Amino acid sequence: MSLLGFLTQEFGQNLIALTMKGSALHLANRRVNTKEPTSPAKTRSLEPVTTTVKSYDITDIKSPRDSESHGTHTSSRAAGREVAGASYFGLAEGTARGGVPGSRIVMYKGCWSSGCYSADVLVAFDDAIADGVDIISVSIGFDGFSPYFEDPLAIGSFHAMKNGILTSASAGNSGPFPLSVANHAPWILTVATSTIDRKFVVHVVLGNGQAFTVSFWLKVIFTNALNDLMKGLSISSFNLNGTSFPWIWGGDAANYSAGADPDILRGSFYGALNSYKVQGKIVFCEGAVDGASILLSNGVGTIMADSSFTDFAFSFSLPATIISVEDGLKILNYIRSTEFPIATILVSETWKDVMAPYVVSFSSRGPNPIAPDILKLDLTAPGIDILAAWSPVALPSVDQEDTRSVKFNIISGTSMSCPHTSGAAAYVKAAHPNWSPAAIKYALMTTAYIVDPKKHEDLEFAYGSGHINPFQAVDPGLVYDAYEADYINFLCMQGYNTTTLRLINGGNNSFCITSTPGRAWNLNYPSCFVAVEDGQQIKAVFTRTVTNVGIPNSTYTLCTYMPASIDVTVVPSVLSFSAIGDKKSF
């Protein structure tokens, strides 16, 4: 039996553990609803162990029950049973299932509404390890570039690795900025998020005698003489039945008695709209809002102009969508030049995204901020507009006052891609129960689909080894392997001494012979990465060892594809194996 665990933090991160038939999947979760459509769950309630938490928020439930639903969503993606007719108010309707639907889920609540604390996270890790999990999935990330001995996720995952447990973790949602990747320790499988071939589109029909289609990143594509048809990415099930409503710019609806003025109200901020002017109208806002201010003022819907969101959609509590700033200027011109501007907002349509998969803008990027010789991230997986189970007491949209209740929801993030990879790791673990955490991780990396570099200017810093390919990962042919001693040697080469090393691995028998910093080129990692400063010569020697897990009598010939300016020599370039388990170095 193998066990997989997931850890994530506030706004969509939690730790989850699942137990599977023949393979156990273990999730330590921020909040998880035990009524979600998975197999029977073992649950444990953890009171905050940190003394900094003095009280609970009204939304906190002192049990593993899920009041935010990040845990429900992620756990069902990893191991949810098949549920026919799943949808979000009719959108994305179909049969939903997780990656390893034969699993049991084991939950540990390690985070609360006030956030995630190091002590609570480490307790969750310790309990998951004690319960014998095999995979831990972490959709949590702490800010900053802390050394490993100050990073609770690096410490917890190191202890998990010592006990034969792979930790799969989200890379973070701080992209596309360089050096923004979280969970970058080499013993962690670090996961970016990429699109799927489905996107949700909302059409907006204007009444100004022209027609054109736009979205966050789609520009004008056609015109006619009937109406103005605009398109933005949004998850909206609201049906106005084609009825047109008056349209008003937020700046023209300022509530002066509340101290608002047109310049402030261009963003339609909460409590600052004049309800007499907004009632029964669609409001155009310069900037993204949650829609609560429009509903408070009895508005019908909203169109928001914001170019910050280019490749994923939000759910709102009213008819709404987001368009680009450029297209927003066209709308504003229409409103100001028309005596009675009108528009209607249609229900979301599902379109096929022929460009998928590609890593989204907000997915955190490398390079590795702590160990530049180790390429991070490791790979990417689906995490955009993902339909999965939802706690009925959690908010169904971005509106904090939305009172609706749903069993499924559509959200995006590296927290959504992480459980896909964790489920895939459990799938590999079930096929190869004796493989080490590194062997499972490296099998997923070396068998990943090649990602089109033309779609990503930051290349491997965006997608790592490529897009996850679970079916091929169970038969990689060769695997790289690494164990605690290899990572200890890596830490010593990073300048750690015996004292700081023991803060990570918790062992009294571990020590560093030298703490003189060196390069990490000999860690048995699937990628070979050279970090050099401008003007330095690009020159490095890497040593790698592979283990045959495929055909007993097999031969592998290395092929390299490099720019003409870079010369790569591999010795030997041909590796021959006579048995499963044979090891060869090059």
Image (spheres, rainbow, N blue to C red):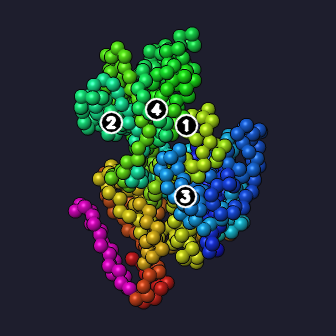
Q: CA distance from mark 2 to mark 3?
A: 34 Å
Residue mark closest to the camera, 4 vs 1: 4
Q: CA distance from mark 4 to mark 1?
A: 20 Å
Which three-letter amino acid code belongs to the residue tagged 1?
A: Val
Quadrant the C terminus occupies? bottom left
Asked whether 201 or 174 is in front, the reply is 201
- Residue at numbered disc 2: 214
Q: CA distance from mark 1 to mark 3?
A: 26 Å
Residue 364 in sight in this render: no
Q: CA distance from mark 4 to mark 2?
A: 20 Å
Disc 1 + disc 3, Cβ < 8 Å:
no
Quadrant the N terminus occupies? bottom right
Asked whether 462 or 304 is in front, the reply is 304
Helix, strand or loop for disc 4:
loop
Q: Which residues are magenta?
A: 554-576
Among numbered discs 4 and 3, the one appearing first in the sequence: 3
- Residue at numbered disc 1: 398
- Residue at numbered disc 3: 84
Among numbered discs 4 and 2, the one appearing first in the sequence: 2
The crowding category of the residue bearing disc 2, from other C-alpha atoms within 10 Å (few below 14, some 14 to 19, many at least 20), is: many
Q: Position of residue 205 (x, y in %)?
A: 36, 31
Give the residue at the far left of this rendering: 564
Helix, strand or loop for disc 1:
loop
Q: Quadrant of residue 312?
A: top left
Among numbered discs 2 and 1, the one appearing first in the sequence: 2
